[in-house]
């Protein structure tokens, strides 16, 4: 019991510290207006580690966006450190935070209120840790006597706390659901565009692979240049691809949405295998989420039912 209490308290301190730091950054934009902006221009500054590799963490992107807070058109330039975090193409709609008093603008995804999640989970873990650490041996013996036939107040409180922790963990898992569903969403978007005949083929040239390094793991995203009357446009694949299939300076064919202007790779038979593999994380996510949710609800039912 004491080791469990120490673990909960240590995790709570870590989360509350992170929440404090995140809140300090977020509150600067707490009163800002959330607007939908349209990307009008993208300017890239590529930094290469080799002729075939573009370093994501050293490259920068400037995005000129247009939005209308209160009906008044406003143009601003957003600066992105890294290619993968920037908008994908001209015409894309993004969410921005805008302060009318100062004119400052930032991408909304940069200032997400993660501190609220960290604060909630940290507070629950701190409460559980303090309760477990403060429980004397006599109380622990009383907890062991708790049964469905002979409930005890302390046992009921323990079940309620455990159920609350499980439900909070299930709620936090929903925050990563968009990332889990991204492969399926991409396939659904391509199928909808094909059904509505919105895709058109365009000629593109591969200019190399965007190299993202995280914890000694290297991910490669092929990047293409499409020459248009308005100037060259650049697009990188949303997922990792084999650099052997996409060679620098060779021509390729991309699909472009006539309405939104976004790009996509033509579907291949191998993409079906990738889709099947993407179902595995979704299945694991569903099983873990349902386990937390059902266990939390069951703990609350077991805490309340004996007293009815």
Image: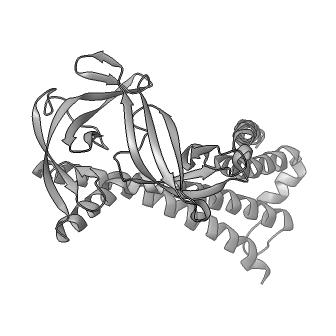
Is 266 drawn above or below residue 192 in the view shown?
above
Percent coordinates x, y for residue 216 in the rendering: 40, 21
How many numbered markers are drawn?
0
Percent coordinates x, y for residue 115 in the rendering: 69, 46
Is 178 drawn above or below residue 229 in the view shown?
below
User: Which one is in front, 303 or 244?
Assistant: 244
User: Which one is in front, 197 or 166?
Assistant: 197
Which residue occupies 87% across, 49% down?
A: 135
223 on left or right of 178: left
Is 13 drawn above or below residue 113 in the view shown?
above
Percent coordinates x, y for residue 9 in the rendering: 76, 40
For the C terminus, the quadrant is bottom right
For the N terminus, the quadrant is top right
Percent coordinates x, y for residue 139 in the rendering: 87, 54
Give the colour scheme shown: one colour
User: Which one is in front, 252 or 241?
Assistant: 252
44 on left or right of 301: left
138 on left or right of 121: right
Outermost residue on the top side: it is 50
Outermost residue on the bottom side: it is 308
Which residue occupies 20% across, 33% down?
A: 242
């Amino acid at each position: 019991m004491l080791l469990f209490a120490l673990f909960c308290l240590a995790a709570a301190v870590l989360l509350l510290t992170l929440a404090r730091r995140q809140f300090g950054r977020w509150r600067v934009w707490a009163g800002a207006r959330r607007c939908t902006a349209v990307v009008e221009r993208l300017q890239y500054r590529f930094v290469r580690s080799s002729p075939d590799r573009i370093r994501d963490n050293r490259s920068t992107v400037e995005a000129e966006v247009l939005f209308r807070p209160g009906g008044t058109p406003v143009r601003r330039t957003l600066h992105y450190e890294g290619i993968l975090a920037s908008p994908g193409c001209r015409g894309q709609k993004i969410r921005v935070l805008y302060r009318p008093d100062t004119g400052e603008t930032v991408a909304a995804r940069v200032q997400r209120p993660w501190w609220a999640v960290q604060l909630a989970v940290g507070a629950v873990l701190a409460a559980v840790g303090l309760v477990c650490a403060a429980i004397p041996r006599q109380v622990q013996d009383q907890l062991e006597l708790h049964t469905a036939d002979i409930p005890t107040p302390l046992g009921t409180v323990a079940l309620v706390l455990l159920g609350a922790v499980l439900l909070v963990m299930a709620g936090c898992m929903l925050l990563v659901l968009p990332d889990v569903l991204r492969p399926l969403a991409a396939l659904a978007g391509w199928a909808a565009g094909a059904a509505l005949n919105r895709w058109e083929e365009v000629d593109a040239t591969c200019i190399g692979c965007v190299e993202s390094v995280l914890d000694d793991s290297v991910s490669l995203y092929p990047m293409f240049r499409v020459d248009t009357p308005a100037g060259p446009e650049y697009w990188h694949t949303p997922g990792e691809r084999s650099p052997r299939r996409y060679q620098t300076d060779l021509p390729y064919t991309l699909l472009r949405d006539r309405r939104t202007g976004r790009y996509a790779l033509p579907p291949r038979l191998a993409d079906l295998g990738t889709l099947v593999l993407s179902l595995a994380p979704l299945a694991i996510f569903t099983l873990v989420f349902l386990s937390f949710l059902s266990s939390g609800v069951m703990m609350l039912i077991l805490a309340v039912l004996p007293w009815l």
